[in-house]
Image: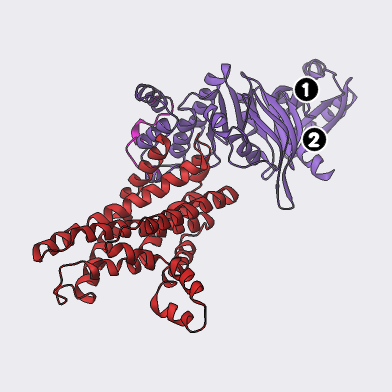
Amino acid sequence: MIRADVLSKHYGSLVAVDGISFQVQPGEVLGFLGPNGAGKSTTMRMFAGFVPPTSGTAEVCGFSIEKQPTEAKRLIGYLPEGAPSYGEMTPRSFLNFIARIRGLSRRETAVRSEDMIERLNLAPVLDQSIETLSKGFKRRVGIAQAILHDPPVLIMDEPTDGLDPNQKHEVRQLIQSMAADKIIVISTHILEEVDAVCNRAIIISQGRIVADETPSTLINRSRFHNAVTLKLDRKTDLDDITQQLQDLNGVEHIEVSHKTCTVTAFPKSDASILKGITDLAAIKDWPIEQLKLESGRLDEVFRTITTADGAA
Amino acid sequence: MNTIKIIAARELRGYFATPLAYVFIVLFLALMGFLTFSLGGFYDRGQADLIPFFGFHPWLYLILIPAISMRLWAEERKSGSIELLMTLPVTMFEAVLGKFLAAWSFTAVALALTFPIWITVNYLGEPDNGVIFAAYIGSLLMAGAFLAIGACISAANRNQVVAFIITIVICFIFLLSGFQPVLDFFSGWAPQPMIDAIASLSFLTHFNALSKGVLDLRDIVYFLLVIGAWLYANTIILDMKKAD
């Protein structure tokens, strides 16, 4: 278990992290979300033992990161923001260095390195210096370094930044394959990623936790949750259909976009309007090109939560 | 101990992965040769010793050692790899000592490559090899002291050029405090104990004693203390500034 207890970090008068508390259990994949400068990286750095907290405590499997840093660091695999490494080294020598400093035996090193090279497709660049690698390879070398010793706690700051969609997919699969018995904390800007790999999401804004839920409940907070969007063939019927939707039972309000020729009907709380709309559409033979039941929009929830907090 | 060795080995290999190491060694040997034979008048003196050779060491180190030490921490901070290093199960002390030992071993290699001059002087005459050995030890210790100062300054600055210049200035002060013209300046008015104190702080005073062949424990301890003190300061500065 890792635990933050009223953890704070001040830089002079700037409050980067403002007394946050949370716990993560094995099996949880926690996604840290938040605007730039919200305190995500600082929080992760405090857990990794790079930045000392101003007040409060961070604990990794019972070890205080301040009082027993070496013991705690042994249990953590950490990918710093930007995946820094030693540019003049090759991925092979770099992984060897990490393995030795983490005290892996020669056999473990060979087996684990082999595994990392295969899982992260590092084979083509093994003997090339890291500074000459593409952003995607650099990032994957950083990830390999973090999970080389098979740590029970994995903290990764933007693990998929700079990867192409295929690589992103592979890294997400890698994270999920390790998720069962590990504590995994990742930070990301990509909201779909939270939905794809995390089973818990914490949104941080201005150094404070403003939401701590599963991604699906977070999505349910969206005003688009259970809304129905229709895209029509032609604009001529738009006003007429809008009017009829407005009168439908359970519909709270309607939003129309003439430009894209779409109508979105928002339900009253907990009301289900999909059936009413499809029935009506069938009877009236509306010229529907597309019909979509919205599950909710994470980016909209994110914006609402983080900007509402900013206004407060 | 093992961790220190791993860090030092990685660092040392890093020197030889870039042209820096080769450029440094070639420059060091070329300058050393030039100074000894041209300015030092190695042949003209007609004496079988290496006094003209070792006499230039402090001044050559003054320029060349900061060039090695400036990157020690400044580069780690600039590239962000310091975050990686400091989140591995490594103590600050191990990291500082490991990197310092790498730089020190590197200068030891450069110094060891001056061996032809030792052979030359033995070929030409019959020098006191004990004195030469002591002088080599003294030179290595002095290089260590320069490096420790440089490492500490490098930790305080993200910019390598700034680290280079500040290191030169501080090393210059440590050297000059034992330089005769400087001591003469004080001897006019300052009390003798103060002059002695200033002189005793100097690298020159202690190095000169060692290079005359006197392996005095006090001189050795002096250099080790200087190294220890600056490395200690290095860990403190690093602790304060690593995440800036």
For the C terminus of chain A, the image quarter is top right
Residue matched to label 2: A256
In the rendering, which numbered label is found on residue A243?
none
Q: Amino acid at mark 1?
A: Asn
Evaluate whether label 1 is on the same chain as label 2.
yes
Q: Chain of mark 2?
A: A
Q: Residue at x 33, y 67 (%)?
A: B208
The single residue placed furthest to the front in the displayed view is B192
What color does chain B have in the rendering?
red
Mark 1 residue crowding within 10 angstroms, few (<14) / some (14–19) / many (20+): many
Q: Chain of mark 1?
A: A
Point out residue A205 in the picture as x, y percentages from the top left corner.
74, 40
Report if residue B35 is visible in the image. yes
Q: Which of the marked residues, 1 or 2, is nearer the chain's N terminus?
A: 1
Verify whether residue B47 appears in magenta. Answer: no
- The part of the chain drawn in magenta is A118-130
